[in-house]
Amino acid sequence: MDELPPLPLVDFPPDALEEIIGWLTPERLAALIDATDLRADTPEAKIRSLAETAVRYRCASVCVNPVEVDLLPRLLAGTGVKDCYVVDFPLGKSTIAMKAHQAARVVAESRALRREGPGWVELDMVINVGRLRDDPEYTWREVAAVVDAADGEVVKVIIRSSELRREDITLACRIAQEAGAHFVKNSTGMEAFGATPEHIRRMREAVGAGMGVKAAGGIRTAADAVRLIFAGAPTSELRTPERFRLGTSSPAGLLSTLERVREELADAIPCSYCPSGYAEKQAPELRAAALAFCPRCPHRHRREEWLSVLYRPPST
């Protein structure tokens, strides 16, 4: 009989979480944050406000849509905060040549406006998930093309992990690593679910300690950050902007919850940070695999509680 895969990360060693909480000052947390706004309706005023917030807290970068390359480098020049742009976001369905062209143009325009030389722009590219299983070599070629077009700048590869089987998450990460990318990232924030400790741990195990891992999607509190740091940066050596990032649209909110982190860790419903908790939102072939964990989970009695929260009608 085949051995059952381990349960998702829904229980955490208290001593490990305490170690992370003790290490996690506001300055250290901010240094790991990519302050993000990827909405279609974001006006210039919000980009300016996000940049001001990122500079105030000294975040790692500000991550926005490519159209903002005419503005963001001017706002961040001389601040020590990088400007970051998504490539072929959110679907990843452009051709390889189109992705490479977009990457090259964004890098060139950012450098021209920022006037600080290389090293201040980052790219978060989306792979074509539909090609991954049938043609892994295609995925390698698209990542390698963007890495080449980026001319030495940091490339993070978004694998859309909620749409992948467990083994495909590992495959996508290893392909990204072999193609020369600097980070793997789980989500655009627009899929069935965002960052879960289970997926972030699998990504870290796939790439080892020598590559960056970025968690993104649904990261709203310091408790979320602690669980994801445990999964993706369990040792202090990995807790640097070069090896671990957190993408969030509310950096100030994330930092403001640090003082309540122990309370929020204790009160959260485990299903809220487990991939199986979002099974109903996944494709049928992934849903069955996700739900297979639930009968063995010690927190299975809380699943209905979480579903009632997940599908609660909006208040009027």
Image (spheres, rainbow, N blue to C red):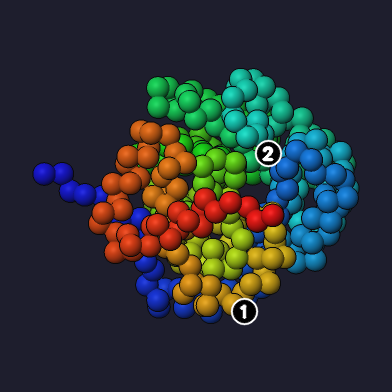
Q: Amino acid at mark 2?
A: Val
Callout 1 crowding tier (Cα within 10 Å): few <14, some 14–19, many ≥20: few
For label 1, the residue is 259
Q: Nearer the viewer, residue 109 or 185?
A: 185
Give the quadrant of residue 153.
top right
Q: What secondary structure is found at the residue carrying circle 1? A: helix
Quarter in which the C terminus is drawn: bottom right
Give how far across and how far down residue 103 sits, in percent. Answer: 70, 32
In the rendered view, does 7 fall on the left or right side of 307? Answer: left
Give how far across and how far down residue 189 sits, in percent. Answer: 60, 45
Q: Residue at x 39, y 68 (%)?
A: 12
Give how far across and how far down residue 43 sits, in percent. Answer: 85, 44
Q: Of all residues shown, which one is farthest toward the left? A: 1
Q: Give the label, 1 or 2, closer to the camera.
A: 1
**In the rendered image of this protein, does residue 24 appear above or below residue 85?**
below
Give how far across and how far down residue 134 sits, in percent. Answer: 40, 22
Q: Nearer the viewer, residue 283 or 1?
A: 283
For label 2, the residue is 86
Q: Residue at x 15, y 44 (%)?
A: 2
Q: Amino acid at mark 1?
A: Glu
**In the rendered image of this protein, does residue 275 appear above or below residue 67?**
below
Q: What secondary structure is found at the residue carrying circle 2? A: strand
Is residue 258 something one can see in this rendering? yes
Give me the C-alpha separation between circle 1 and circle 2: 32 Å
Q: Nearer the viewer, residue 167 or 38?
A: 38
